[in-house]
């Protein structure tokens, strides 16, 4: 098995005992997601990854799993409890899926604890210590007494549990200690609950002359139970964490979408418990009380022999220990923007520019809008907002533009899961500044990433447009790999304006020139292009598809890829996360291969290249970037964009640089087989293996080059009959 798809031949197909006309031709979505999270966890075990980055991967795997339960498992659980037996695309009922998920997730959690133990030992070797109460010195105890009274005690709410004091409500991700207490005089027993406040760091830093030492907050609380329940002694205790159903449901006929979401967010806090993580060997009486009060059954309880709340370990990824982190990396400012002294409009006027984040700084997107806000020649700005940072510089720029009298329209998507509250706050702020705030469709999420700036230049108005594959979020843009296309092409400007009119006025575009959008024609465009490749293969022409996305589960698209493979189209897919397609199966998908890249940065860009009668790469290829994964929700129930790239340099950058490097990656690549199993080649420490993230950090993008030109920028592929596009 070789992960280098650029040079290696297609592997021998796998013989599987499945009927290609049945649901068995698909792989289960939920199990595929769990497989992705296993790959994340395995990065925590990868000795090539710096120690604290391995700890970060462990934390991410735990955060991912918690969210998976509060959303996906919660939804399946509701279906199963309602007696719903509608199968998923692979033929499994909700109840059948829950059984498989539960077994896999329990094994995953057990592995997380094992990895944590190994990393904890490695941290000790680096003078980073996670202590227990038994490890404390008298000096530590004195420090913690003062710290507890000053920093923790005022926030605590110790709660007795008896007929006069009912069991309190614990919100989603609520973490608490259950205590079995006994009065020192009189031997009267008492059960109590001590919620662990989320407002205080989970790990308390202790004074030390060398290294770093930390005590978990729950250990500090147990150390000071006597201050919280004077006269009582602890006879038993356990820790537990609650995960609740966080899958929002909206009324179909909500009169006020904003108000409906504000109410729904309050409902989310009170969702039913879908998983209870509990200390192993908890006193039976406490365990029984907790389960009874939270209304959970044995199948929802996970007994944890180790640290509950592994997600909190991200607090121990210490900036001051740079020796245990990835080497520093500073994103580049594109040379062309520097040539024009930071003037984004001048740089874009010269020719289209594609930035590859985080290798090229996302600050250019912020600068584009900030410059527009202050430019007296700019008359209008339109912007979609799906996820933004808490103090978003993009929202700041839009507010500034609106306050300056410019026409500003902001499409704020309230249905961005877990960011709904932040988006409501942003929309209120934009309205106060004088912007037109619209919320799109009730039944469709608006996931498209578009900005337009209309600027008066002489006697005409010029539309500058930005299309992105990622969110307008400066924080996540530091670690997500995404593409940003800047253009003043009039056709794309008209297309973007029609999309905004569709979002704000429900005016469905009658003719788009270089753009396809979901839910109207994006899926049809993909299916048509796949069918064209299949026709080319039947006619004996070169037929290839290269595609990159986060998830692939849409049945019609998968079946179209299967059919194209059977006609001879060579299909190479890079799917980071969920993949419902079975690659390399005899009689089904011999000409399809799939790999996933998991490494320093989170692969997030969506790209698809169709050979169009020539061998990839070629100037004749059809090349697209998109906001959409190939999932039912994205193609059928969201507003998404698929932008055809026609600029020659940008096309060469996408095919011969971005896609080629992803295809050639070995160091971070996992290859999927027809059974849904991902494997990667073990690489000895003394052997160099190509790493696409390293390549992008070291080499500038083609279309961002300035006066130096693009000829000296490394490209990994060339056409057989054509040199690199300039």
Image (tube, rainbow, N blue to C red):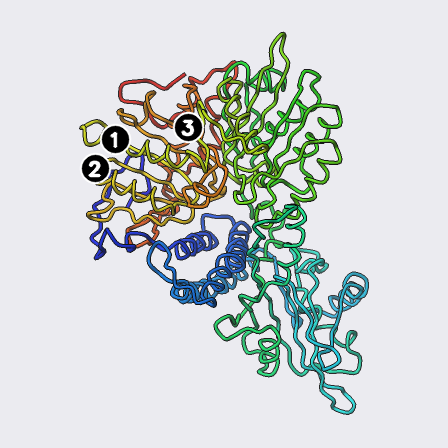
Frontmost of labels 3 and 2 is 2
Outermost residue on the bottom side: it is: 186
Mark linked to residue 654? 3
Instruction: List x then y, in percent, for residue 541.
Output: 21, 27
The residue mark sitting in front, 2 or 1, is 2
Residue drawn 67% across the image and 34% down it: 393
Of the two numbered discs 1 and 3 in the rendering, the one whose residue sits closer to the viewer: 1
Residue 508 image point, x, y percent: 50, 31
Quadrant assignment for the C terminus: top left
The image quadrant of residue 293 is: bottom right
Question: In this image, 358 relative to 36: left or right?
Answer: right
Mark 2 surroundings: few (<14), some (14-19) or many (≥20) residues within 10 A: many
Res 193 quadrant in image: bottom right
**Separation of residues labelled 3 and 2 (CA atoms):** 26 Å
Identity of the residue drawn at 34% across and 51% down: 679
**Badges 1 and 3: C-beta atoms under 8 Å apart?**
no
Q: Secondary structure at mark 1?
A: loop
Say whether marks 2 and 1 touch (CB < 8 Å): yes
Helix, strand or loop at label 3? It is helix
Residue with the mark numbered 1: 543
Who comes first in sequence, dot 1 or dot 3?
Answer: 1
Of mark 2 and mark 1, the one earlier in the sequence is 1
Relative height, residue 20 to residue 296 (above, below): above
Distance, label 1 to label 3, CA atoms, is 18 Å
Q: CA distance from mark 2 to mark 1?
A: 9 Å
According to the picture, the residue beneath numbered tag 2 turns out to be 567
Residue 405 x, y percent position in the rendering: 74, 23
Look at the numbered discs 3 and 2 and tell me whether their residues touch, using CB distance below 8 Å.
no
**Label 3, residues with CA under 10 Å away: few <14, some 14-19, many ≥20:** many
Q: Earlier in the sequence, mark 3 or mark 2?
A: 2
Give percent across and percent down for residue 188: 74, 89
């Amino acid at each position: 098995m070789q992960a280098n798809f650029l040079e290696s031949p297609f592997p021998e197909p796998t013989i599987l005992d499945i009927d290609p006309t049945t649901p068995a031709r698909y792989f289960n979505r939920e199990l595929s997601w769990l497989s992705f999270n296993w790959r994340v966890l395995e990065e925590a075990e990868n000795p090539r990854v710096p120690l604290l980055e391995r700890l970060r991967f462990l934390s991410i795997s735990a955060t991912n799993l918690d969210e998976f339960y509060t959303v996906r498992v919660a939804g399946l659980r509701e279906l199963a409890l309602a007696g719903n037996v509608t199968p998923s695309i692979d033929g499994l009922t909700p109840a059948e899926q829950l059984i498989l998920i539960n077994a896999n997730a329990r094994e995953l959690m057990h592995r997380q604890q094992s990895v944590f133990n190994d990393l904890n030992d490695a941290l000790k070797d680096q003078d980073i210590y996670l202590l227990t109460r038994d490890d404390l010195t008298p000096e530590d105890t004195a420090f913690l007494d003062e710290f507890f009274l000053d920093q923790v005690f005022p926030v605590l709410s110790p709660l007795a549990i008896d007929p006069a004091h009912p069991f309190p409500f614990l919100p989603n991700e609520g973490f608490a200690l259950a205590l079995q207490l006994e009065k020192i005089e009189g031997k009267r027993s008492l059960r109590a609950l001590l919620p662990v406040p989320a407002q205080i760091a989970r790990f308390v830093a202790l004074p030390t002359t060398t290294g770093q030492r930390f005590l978990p907050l729950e250990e500090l609380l147990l150390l000071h139970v006597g201050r919280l329940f004077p006269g009582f002694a602890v006879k038993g205790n356990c820790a537990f964490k609650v995960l609740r159903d966080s899958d929002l449901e909206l009324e179909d006929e909500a009169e006020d979408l904003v108000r409906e979401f504000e109410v729904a967010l309050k409902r989310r806090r009170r969702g039913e418990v879908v998983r209870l993580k509990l200390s192993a060997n908890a006193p039976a009486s406490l365990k029984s009380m907790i389960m009874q009060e939270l209304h959970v059954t044995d199948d929802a309880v996970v007994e944890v022999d180790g640290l509950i709340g592994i997600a909190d370990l991200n607090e121990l990824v210490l900036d001051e220990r740079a020796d245990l982190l990835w080497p520093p990396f500073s994103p580049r400012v594109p040379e062309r923007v520097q040539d024009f002294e930071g003037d984004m409009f001048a740089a874009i006027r010269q020719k289209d520019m594609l930035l590859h984040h985080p290798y090229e700084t996302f600050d250019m997107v912020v600068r584009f809008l900030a410059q527009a806000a202050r430019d007296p020649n700019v008359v209008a700005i339109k912007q979609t907002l799906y996820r933004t940072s808490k103090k978003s510089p993009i929202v700041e720029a839009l507010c500034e533009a609106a306050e300056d009298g410019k026409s500003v329209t902001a499409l704020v998507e309230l249905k961005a899961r877990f960011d709904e509250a932040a988006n409501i706050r942003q929309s209120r702020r934009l309205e106060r500044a004088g912007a037109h705030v619209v919320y799109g469709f009730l039944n469709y999420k608006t996931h498209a990433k578009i900005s337009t700036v209309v600027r008066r230049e002489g006697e005409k108005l010029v539309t500058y447009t930005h299309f992105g594959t990622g969110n307008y979020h400066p924080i996540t843009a530091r670690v997500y790999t995404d593409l940003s296309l800047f253009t003043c092409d009039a056709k794309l400007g008209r297309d973007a304006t029609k999309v905004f009119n569709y979002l704000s006025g429900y005016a469905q575009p009658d003719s788009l020139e270089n753009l396809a959008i979901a839910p109207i024609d994006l899926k049809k465009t993909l299916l048509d292009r796949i069918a064209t490749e299949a026709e080319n293969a039947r006619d004996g022409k070169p037929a290839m598809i290269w595609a990159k996305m986060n998830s692939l589960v849409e049945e019609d698209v998968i079946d179209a890829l299967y059919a194209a493979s059977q006609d001879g189209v060579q299909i190479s897919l890079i799917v980071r996360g969920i993949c419902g397609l079975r690659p390399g199966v005899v009689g089904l998908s011999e000409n399809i291969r799939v790999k996933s890249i998991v490494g320093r940065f989170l692969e997030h860009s969506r790209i698809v290249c169709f050979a169009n009668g020539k061998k990839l790469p070629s100037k004749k290829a059809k090349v697209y970037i998109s906001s959409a994964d190939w999932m039912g929700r994205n193609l059928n129930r969201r507003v998404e964009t698929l932008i055809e790239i026609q600029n020659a340099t940008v096309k060469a950058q996408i095919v011969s640089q971005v896609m080629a490097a992803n295809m050639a990656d070995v160091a971070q690549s996992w290859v999927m087989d027809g059974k849904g199993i991902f494997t990667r080649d073990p690489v000895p420490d003394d052997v160099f293996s190509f790493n696409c993230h390293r390549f992008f950090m070291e080499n500038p993008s083609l279309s961002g080059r300035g006066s130096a030109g693009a000829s000296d920028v490394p490209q990994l592929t060339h056409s057989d009959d054509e040199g690199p596009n300039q």
